[in-house]
Amino acid sequence: MRNKLALLFCEQNESNYRLIAGVDEAGRGPLAGNVVAAAVILDPKSEIIGLNDSKKLSESTRDKLSKQIKQQALAFAIAEADVSEIDRLNILQATMLAMQRAVAALQLEPDFTYVDGNRSPQWAYKSKALIKGDQRIQSIAAASILAKVHRDQCLRVLHEQFPGYGFAKHKGYPTAEHLAALQALGPCPVHRRSYAPVKAVLETK
């Protein structure tokens, strides 16, 4: 059975470009931790079944697909923008920076890039931004999976470094549990001080 992500664009078959990178991010909404971007150039001769928006996949499926993507892709890279960059630049610009870093780190230089969202970073690559691109383009879906799996792993490490906040569970998102811990403990070094809930706690403290 062919991949059910029957894409509106099949980049490998319908494009004149040879090396096409899909780019996506994970972690724009959380109150803590870095924002992560990934870039993937898939091999059109090596199909990966089950690619989809990482949020629509279970954790175990994401982990399995992440390993498969790394084994079968022509090239992939993962990059981050840290909390200080998020606070200094704002989350949009920090996300663009992480995407630039991911594409620059690819082992192969892409001829074209597809970027999830409504804008592409400022770079020299020919590029197209697509809203819900992770549901439409295989390489973007692959990038979304790598970014999500990597960031989740990073938050599990932060959970060990800063116990009490529940990072391993909520991955830094503003859940009720996280907000309660933030009120009780105050922000830790990996909290984004430019985000309203964190800023509000700092002002009250």
Image (cartoon, rainbow, N blue to C red):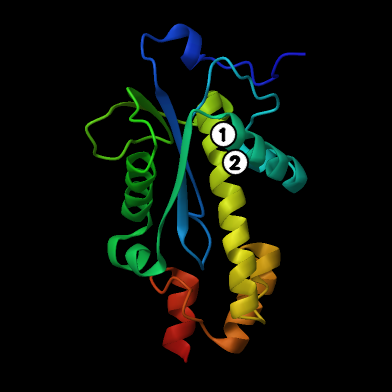
- Amino acid of disc 1: Ala
Whether residues under marks 1 and 2 lie with C-beta atoms below 8 angstroms apart, the answer is: yes
Residue 96 percent coordinates (x, y) = 34, 47
Residue indicated by mark 2 = 145
Tag 2: amino acid: Ile
Residue 147 image offset from top left, x and y in percent:
53, 47
Q: The N terminus lies in which quarter of the figure? A: top right
The residue located at (47%, 89%) in the rendering is: 204
When asked about the image quadrant of residue 145, the answer is top right
SS type, badge 1: helix
Q: Is residue 120 above or below residue 167?
A: above
The residue under the point 60% across, 80% down is 162
Determine whether 114 is above or below 153 in the image: above
Q: CA distance from mark 1 to mark 2?
A: 5 Å
- Residue topped by disc 1: 142
| 10 Å crowding of disc 1: few (<14), some (14-19), many (20+) | many
Residue 22: give x, y in percent of width and height. Answer: 45, 31
Please provide percent x and percent y for residue 82: 40, 64
Residue extending farthest left: 124
